[in-house]
Amino acid sequence: MARLAGLPVFDPLGDQVGRVWDVVALMPGDFRRVRAIGLVVEVPGRRRVFLPMTRVTSMDAGQVITTGLVNMRRFEQRSTETLLIAEVLERQVTLVDGSGVATVEDLAIEQQRNRDWHVTKVFVRRGRPQRGLSGRLRRRGETLLLDLRDVQGLSGETPDQGASLLVASFEDMKAADIADLLHDLSGKRRLELAAELDDERLADVLEELPDDDQVEILSGIGSARAADVLEAMQPDDAADLLSELSEEQQEQLLGLMEPDEAADVRRLLAYEENTAGGLMTPEPVILPPEATVAEALAHVRRAELSPALAAAVFVCRPPLETPTGRFLGVAHIQRMLREAPHEAIGTVLDSDIEALDVHAPLALVTRRLATYNLLSVPVTDADGRLLGVVTVDDVLDHLLPEDWREQDDLLEDQHTDTSPVEQPVEQPIQQQDPQVTVTRGEDGRRG
């Protein structure tokens, strides 16, 4: 079953519909007949939809073929359903023969004579997973291929479930996509996945999550690691997250952070949230006027920079750490690309951009960005020293409603789908006045 994750899904004409994300199963109380009722398929737009097994015509190691009928409504997991990849792999189970515990590494699903798909085998590794000095799981112990009836504990709460196999599938995913997945999981499983992500990756993901999820994860990973993750975040994002905590928690985490990192965050926490000071990041690309165009372009190539921060170099007199010496102007990357590499950036400055006061309200910041078509705008103090810059993505985060991530699915539902995939009409409930007959739909779910 693990081989299905990531497989392309095609319609009969050979057009790709999406990729397999997970397998949905129904697990009865005795676990003797675990039926796979469908696939979760990620289609363009990062939407995950439900594909019933009845609409799968072929499934092998390289692809999944469908009838071409895909309901584009977003998949919502029901209480009776289990996601086999996200919730069962790496689960701790007990061997019925009394020989101890094992870790589930894969499952086998097979089509029965009645064309239903059932989980028939469980591939396990004896013993509990152990972590090496690096924190990664070490694969040791005998492996066994067992019948479903030979294990207990495939469902329900488990005190220790790994997530390294699931995290491995995140390698090519954007942080926003991982955040979307974490948001849909239970709190316990969310923390298990967070534990497997390295600090840099988890920091990127936290920046894309709603406030409640951020606080839950930060509170659940331990103070020492939480401080490391905060250091890896952009200072303005770290300050926004800390502002959701109590003053006692803020001080505890700031005390565990490196002094230089904590100083930047403390400074941002002192400003009102919807002001230029509360929105700005204190770590833009800053260079002296005598630096060459070649040097400047080398700095903005850094992979960790966001597109908005990489679009301009802020030129100041030393010192170059915020608060800097006197702010001189902005060297835009588009202008620098037209100049000779040996030219000093002080000769290509845009000095007409008026810096914002640190207490400027959000409305003024927005107007300044829109009026001059800017991706970022400088923020200075009364002495003309650069304190930071406000980027357009930070402004958007504050202009959108707090639940804008949850509203994304509603907006997609309102948008007319123009893809070649046919959207079938759901089978209606058969009604007999005055009674209603409940039937099992084509997707295997009760309707």
Image: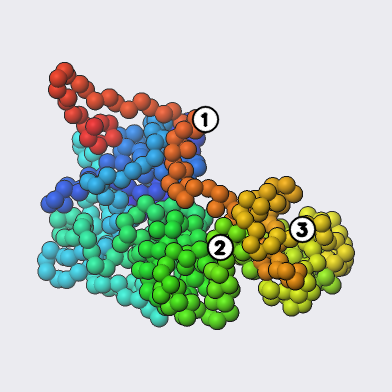
State left or right for residue 113 relative to residue 271: left
Q: Residue at x 20, y 29 (%)?
A: 439
User: Badge 3: few (under 14), some or many (20 or more) residues near its Cα, within 10 Å?
Assistant: few
Disc 2 is placed on an element classified as: loop
Amino acid at dot 1: Thr
Structural distance between the alpha carbons of marks 2 and 1: 44 Å
Amino acid at dot 2: Glu
Q: Kindly indicate whether the residue at mark 3 contacts the one at mark 1 (C-beta within 8 angstroms).
A: no
> Which numbered disc, 2 or 1, marks the residue that appears first in the sequence?
2
Residue 195 image offset from top left, x and y in percent: 38, 68
Tell me the residue that label 2 is attached to: 272
**Mark 2 or mark 1, which is nearer to you?**
2
Q: Residue 77 lies in what quarter of the image?
A: top left
Residue 107 image offset from top left, x and y in percent: 28, 55
Q: Nearer the viewer, residue 435 or 392?
A: 392
Tell me the residue that label 3 is attached to: 354
Q: Residue at x 49, y 57 (%)?
A: 208
Q: Residue 48 lies in what quarter of the image?
A: top left
User: Badge 1: few (under 14), some or many (20 or more) residues near its Cα, within 10 Å?
Assistant: few
Q: Is residue 408 visible?
A: yes
Amino acid at dot 3: Glu
Report how many numbered discs are placed on residues in the image.
3
Q: Nearer the viewer, residue 389 or 411?
A: 389
- Above or below, 312 relative to 71: below
Q: Kindly indicate whether the residue at mark 1 contacts the one at mark 2 (C-beta within 8 angstroms).
A: no
- Quarter of the rendering occupied by the C terminus: top left
Residue 43 image offset from top left, x and y in percent: 46, 41
State left or right for residue 140 relative to residue 367: left
Disc 3 is placed on an element classified as: loop
Q: Residue 217 lies in what quarter of the image?
A: bottom left
Tell me the residue that label 1 is attached to: 418
> Which numbered disc, 1 or 3, marks the residue that appears first in the sequence?
3
